[in-house]
Amino acid sequence: MNRYLLLMLLMLGFQTKASEQNNSSRTLDSATAIMWYECSNGEAIFYADFEAFFKLKETLVKIVSSDPVGKFDKVDPNSDYNFMYFKIEEPEPRWAVGVLLEDTFIAGGKIYQFDPKIMDRWHYHNEMRVLNNEAVKHIRKERTDDTLNYCGVAKSVP
């Protein structure tokens, strides 16, 4: 009986871990648009419908399909963040958010690490779109919070 109980607990643990990983992957995979907001310049690049959107989404889904390296606690107001807003239509329309740093991506409260070279091409692509005046100057936030700066990062106290 103890072996059966242990086996059931192990199976439940594996299923929970797989479910957590698949949740972020499913969320990103179901996105119908991505807004990549760079805090360093305050500009956003909007991706939807075209080949670049599908390739960017595929890249991010691959990153969150790996094992997370930790849980996300809080943002560091001194870090240079890129926020990724994902337009999700089901079960109700909303914007999900991810945080992109040089070699980590945060989604669903988990931190995923990747080789920074994976995103080099995307940073270059964004820079070219900014140079072509394709950037927008606004940000999507689900709620208004005076303790956050324009990037959604906690304001540092003077």
Image (cartoon, helix red, strand yellow):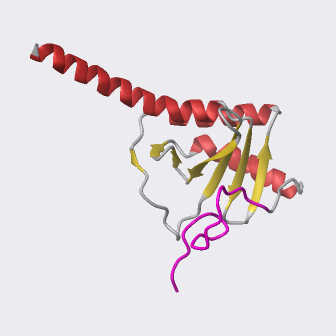
Can residue 65 be spotted in the picture? no
Residue at the right extreme? 132
Q: Give the range drawn in magenta.
A: 138-158
Secondary structure mostly seen in the magenta stretch: loop
- Residue 82, image x and y in percent? 63, 56
* Quarter of the figure that contains the N terminus: top left
Where residue 131 appears, as percent x and y from the top left, is 85, 57
Compared to residue 149, the image places residue 74 above or below, namely: above
Q: Viewed as shown, does residue 23 lie left or right of 14? A: right
Comparing 125 with 12, the one in front is: 12
Picture quadrant where residue 117 is located: top right
Outermost residue to the left? 2
Residue 150 on the magenta span: yes
Instruction: Please report the residue visible at 80 percent of the width from the left and 38 percent of the height from the top.
Output: 48
- The answer to whether any part of residue 17 appears in the image is yes
Q: In this view, does 128 lie to the left or right of 112?
A: right
The reply to whether the magenta stretch includes residue 32 is: no
Q: Which residue is drawn at 59% across and 69% down?
A: 148
- What residue sits 57% from the left and 52% below the top? 99
Q: Nearer the viewer, residue 54 or 15?
A: 15
Q: Is residue 71 left or right of residue 119?
A: left
Residue 16 lies, with reference to residue 4, above or below; the image says below
The residue most toward the front is 92
Q: Specify whether 146 is left or right of 65.
A: right
Q: Where is residue 23 in the image (x, y as percent from the top left)?
A: 51, 32
Front one among 58 and 12: 12
